[in-house]
Amino acid sequence: MIPDDVIRERVERLRQVVRYHSYRYHVLDDPEISDAEYDALMVELKELEAAHPELVTPDSPTQRVGAEPLPEFEKVQHRRPLLSLDNAFDGEEVRAWEKRVLRLLGNGAGVNYTVEPKIDGLAVSLRYENGLLVQGATRGNGFVGEDVTQNLRTIIAIPLRIPVVGDESPPRYLEARGEVYMPRDRFDQMNQRREAEEKRPFANPRNAAAGSVRQLDPSITATRPLSVFMYAVGEVEGASLATQCDALSFLRRMGFPTAANIARCDTLDEVLDLYGQWMAQRDDLNYDADGVVIKVDSLEQQDLLGEVSHAPRWAIAFKFPAHEGITRLVRIGVNVGRTGSLNPYAELEPMVVGGVTIRHATLHNEADIHRKDIREGDTVIVKRAGDVIPQVVAPLTELRSGQEEVFEMMKTCPACGEQVVKPEDEVMYYCINASCPAQLVGRVGHFASRGAMDIEGFGERLAQAFVENGLLVDVVDFYYLRRDDLLSLEGFADQSADNLLAAIEASKNRPLWRLITGLGIRGVGGVVAQLLTRHFASMDELMGASQEGLEEIEGLGPHTAQSVVDFFSQGRNRRLIEKLRRADVRMTRLAEEEAREEGPLTGQTFVITGTLPTMSQEVAAEYIEAQGGRVTSSVSRNTSYLLSGERPGGAKVERAKELGVPIIGEDDLRRLVDGA
Ligand code: IVH
């Protein structure tokens, strides 16, 4: 037996927490937990109270529905209460609900159902008199809401006047009900903007919608991308409706948006089938839906069924598995990515969300952690949607004990111990040690790739195998491989080993720009490397270059210059170059790298961005230079053309437009050369 005082304490604690979250949700419009989590707390409280009725108090959150409206808004008495819905979490519960419906309606009654998405937004009631919007209110506690007419008037999707369609005139009186929501794409855009302005992002579209409607200043609401789906007719004079389907098509004729794909079903099996379909496409919708609402279609049957306390018997919400959960963030760890980025992640106390156990979640970067004020030891909301990696959304700051620790990114790489750098204008920290073990596979793969040293037959898969077998400890070990080493690996025979060794040998004499590209210096791809070899005859010259010297090179930005200097300032990277030299890898440029061809593009300067249809950026650069043109890495007044492919860099395109630099495609380039 659990002692009474322990239960009493638990009940009191639950009440406190439920009250707190109910206040966040209903009054502040800034909930910190999902509906599912709130429901779970409420269920536990109800169960404890049911088992210990002597503990029930009149002010327990179980004893009323909803919370008080904000005092600042005028109050609106709803003519008919806005009910809430009972929830079902599995098919069994839905079948039990149907059973009760059929029992209450009496044997032999035919029942149809509508299946609608349960939109996760803010419920509103709109009153129209002779077609004119006269009042808009929130649900509030179901009986009394807040007058938010001025705010709702700013939502374009809400008609201010019901249009006259054909010979159907608007009803004398109409109360329409629906859900204000923020479309997901617009929500993402808005949050990006807020982040750029260093404002705290909204946790989810529901918060954003609710917070926007309940602004005391309607001009703020007007700037928020809100929309609405209507799902019910409350009261109507001057129209007769027999079914929920009628009501929805009536609403559509009256100019209101309703959710697409609402279906009528004859059997519960069809209903359950539709639930599956909605769930499958849930992540593809442009609005958040946390389940479907199943309604008895006939309004007469709805009346017969009536309601119990706060919820109708004629409808039920069949919830989707949760996308969010709450747990403790034990520690913030840092992974080194293949490109050297230091990626923070959350180590979580394991928890189950939507049937999956989650132990880790991403945290993006240090700035994001600080903006969201996430600390080690915090209780946090974790979101997991579809196949997306779980994310820490926000901390529950009121649960802090004071022991939580503010995170600070380490100054040395957790994998190799070298100093890390944080380029200006970037949010990520990077380890720039070319021999860092965490990056080795990626770096070796890049070194050997077609855009760099072009070692035939050597892709990332082999790089992985070599690193795993301890044959490569840095990028350069490559040139110290022996035949026996290769033969010791599974899949290598005499012939394939010889081929690879020959390919490695051949790579020693590549143009200098390829070697520079292969080093994987941040910001230095093939095009920039070619630019560098125009100015530096050898690796030694490049290594000796100063920041100022590099910045003088036209077309090379200061960030790239800094990145080159940083790279060669690391002792490890300089030792790597020595090791390359000892292996007889070419360290000076070829004659053709220096000489500039005369040709149809002489005097023209190009910048390349995006993926071109047939050429890689490096090939395009070589092509342009072979025709006498120049390629630089940033758009300036001196740029003649921006050569752009798919997924171009936004900043380059913007700058080109700003300066009036023509933007051309690969075809145009060929025409310039052919003179066509
Ligand atoms: S019907 C009396 N239909 O869910 C029936 N409600 O948990 C209640 N909701 O307050 C309204 N989508 O804000 C209905 N298609 C839909 C809905 C929906 C979302 C919301 C509504 C309500 C809450 C109940």
Image: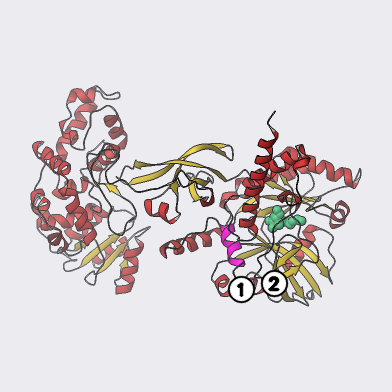
Judged from the image, the secondary structure of the residue bearing numbered disc 1 is loop
Where residue 621 sits: x, y (%)? Answer: 22, 57
Specify the segment rendered in magenta.
197-215
Distance, label 2 to label 1, CA atoms, is 18 Å
Where residue 413 sits: x, y (%)? Answer: 28, 42
In this rendering, the count of numbered labels is 2
For the residue marked with disc 2, what is the amino acid? Answer: Glu
Q: Is residue 213 magenta?
A: yes
Q: Is residue 602 left or right of residue 42?
A: left
Vertical position of residue 273 compared to residue 193: above or below: above
Q: Residues within 10 Å of mark 2 (few under 14, many from 20)?
A: few
Q: Residues within 10 Å of mark 1 (few under 14, many from 20)?
A: many
Q: Is residue 333 magenta?
A: no
Camera sees residue 524: yes
Q: Which residue is disc 1 drawn over?
A: 154
- Name the quarter where the C terminus is drawn: bottom left
Where residue 577 sits: x, y (%)? Answer: 13, 42
Where residue 174 sits: x, y (%)? Answer: 78, 70
- Dividing the picture into quadrants, the one containing residue 120 is bottom right
